[in-house]
Image: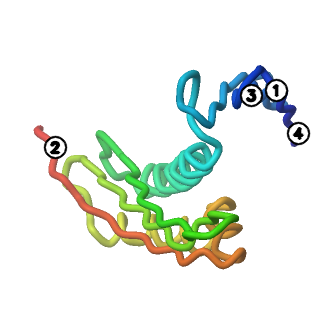
């Protein structure tokens, strides 16, 4: 994997992924998200991919899966993340709680590279879920 990040003036940068996608990053939030926000989005998408794959394999009728990520940062520079909580709101028909709990647990403990990397780096990680019954 690789990426390039090119300065685009002021505090803006254009990141290009190895797969050819561009993302604007801007510390001042004029033209894109901040770098640390992208890290949280990466965490949410990485773990969501895992959770959805596991729920599909267990034949759960999922209508929606939203990862809500809340993070705390250190007061001093570098302002690293100290705590991150990922809450999954999973909506579907007749979802089995055991399957949702297991999907979240497997993602957190075995599969999500971003989560595991942050945890190994000293970030206190926590995960939870909420199940919402979807209309038939």
Residue 76 position in % (x across, y down): 62, 70
Residue 113 position in % (x across, y down): 69, 61
Q: What element carries label 1?
A: strand
Q: Quick one: label 3 or label 4, which is nearer the N terminus?
A: 4
Q: What element carries label 4?
A: loop
Q: Quick one: label 3 or label 2, which is nearer the N terminus?
A: 3
Q: Distance between the residues labelled 3 and 2?
A: 41 Å
Quarter residue 95 falls in: bottom left
Q: How far apart are marks 1 and 4 (CA)?
A: 17 Å
Give the number of the disc on residue 43: none
Q: Nearer the viewer, residue 58 or 15?
A: 15
Looking at the rendered image, the disc whose residue lies closer to the viewer, 3 or 2, is: 3
Residue 23 left/right relative to 95:
right
Q: What element carries label 3?
A: strand
- The residue labelled by disc 2 is 134
Give the number of the disc on residue 13: 3
- The residue labelled by disc 4 is 2
Q: Quick one: label 3 or label 1, which is nearer the N terminus?
A: 1
């Amino acid at each position: 994997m690789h990426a390039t990040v090119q300065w685009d003036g002021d505090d803006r940068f254009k990141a290009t992924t190895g797969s050819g996608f561009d993302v604007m990053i801007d510390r001042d939030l004029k033209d894109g998200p901040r770098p640390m926000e992208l890290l949280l989005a990466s965490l949410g998408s990485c773990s969501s991919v895992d959770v959805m794959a596991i729920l599909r394999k267990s034949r759960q009728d999922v209508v929606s899966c939203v990862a809500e990520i809340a993070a705390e940062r250190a007061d001093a520079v570098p302002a690293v993340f100290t705590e991150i909580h990922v809450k999954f709101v999973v909506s579907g028909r007749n979802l089995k709680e055991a399957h949702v709990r297991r999907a979240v647990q497997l993602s957190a403990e075995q599969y999500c590279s971003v989560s595991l990397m942050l945890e190994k780096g000293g970030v206190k990680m926590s995960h939870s879920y909420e199940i919402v019954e979807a209309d038939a």
